[in-house]
Image: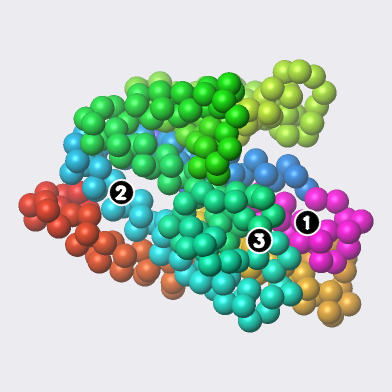
Amino acid sequence: MDNAPQQNRNDNLQMLRFFAAAFVLLTHITFYIHERVDNTIGIWHVGEVGVPIFFVISGFVMHLSAARIPRDSDGARIFMHRRVSRIFPLYWLITIVKLCIAFAVPAAILHNAPDLLHSLGSLVLFPMFNSEGQIRPIHGVAWTLLHEMLFYYIFALAMVLRRSPYVFSTIVITGMWAAGLFIQPESALAYVCTDRINLMFVAGMSLSAWIKSGRSIPRALGLLMLAVAVASLQGVDGAFFAFIHGYNIDAALIVMAAMALSLNALPSLKRLLVSLGDSSYSLYMLHPILAPAICVLLLKLKISSPYIIVPVAFVACVTAANLLYRYIENPLNELAKRHLGKVFLKSRPSHVAAKGS
């Protein structure tokens, strides 16, 4: 494959990261309006597709990264060093902020009130039931990170066992899901392991393997996939669309469509969306704190129209997340890489560590 298509695919994924985060943000803004401003305003559930889109992208990217990492214990350390450095610094910061808010202004936390054991479990991203019987860390949206970390642990285990991370992860994830069809999970960990949303990691890895083999998705097919996904998300009647949506296949179709389509005719817009894609994790982590505060603030200013609240909250969250990424998340990640390297890579020869960093 030549460099241009590869770059285009990376740009498409980055733009899609932003769209996925934006979908989740819009759904949550409508949820906050419903809960805190006007309960007659409906919740826009379509944006929930953003989460499985993230998982498909994660599977895609992890499959690509595995090709450049050795299949052994050294490779597993390199892999986990990168993932932990990427996931935990901002997550810990936001969780600490959430805990401070919970203790300083308890009335601001309508759900997921913290306790000591749940807080400790949240910090290490171990699946636990909260006080409302939900599998949620203290920072509620981080439930997705429980699935991400499970995927990373399985992926790293494959390297330790010197097996193909793609094949091994596919077998384990699919096997756990199949087991959940026959055995009712009882623990929070079992629920996370058997959840069918984990199949989206497999879908992402499979799409990556398809693209990496030199094959492509025709534009016409990509448009058809996008149309089917949109119809599914809009709740078109029929068993076919119910199946597509029920198994999150619409999310996989959207990512596949992104691989077939491009935005080369609008380079300025493309650069902006790619840049916003870089800050998608900050947007996902920050918005559950900032967006409800904006909703409450606007209500105090006698502004209750969703036509005003939604765009104001959306723009404010996207702008704040971009700043958070530039000045806090990115520096934190770099700091974590340096210090965690002493833990994950300390037993490796220096020239090997440098190559894998």
Distance CA(mark 2)–CA(mark 3): 29 Å
The color scheme shown is rainbow
Tag 1: residue type? Thr
Say which residue appears at 46% left-offset and 66% top-offset: 92
- Marks 3 and 1, the one that precedes in the sequence: 1
- Are there few (<14), some (14-19), or many (20+) residues within 10 Å of tag 2? some
Q: Residue furthest top?
A: 239
- From the image, state whether disc 2 or disc 1 is nearer to you: 2
Q: Position of residue 55 (x, y in %)?
A: 51, 40
- Marks 2 and 1, the one that precedes in the sequence: 1
Residue position for label 3? 112
Say which residue appears at 69% left-offset and 75% top-offset: 106
Q: Is 232 left or right of 194, judged from the image as shown? A: right
Image: magenta residue range? 23-43
Q: Nearer the viewer, residue 195 or 313?
A: 195
Q: Position of residue 351 (x, y in %)?
A: 8, 52
Tag 3: residue type? Asn
Q: Is residue 73 above or below residue 303?
A: above
Name the disc covering residue 110, or none: none
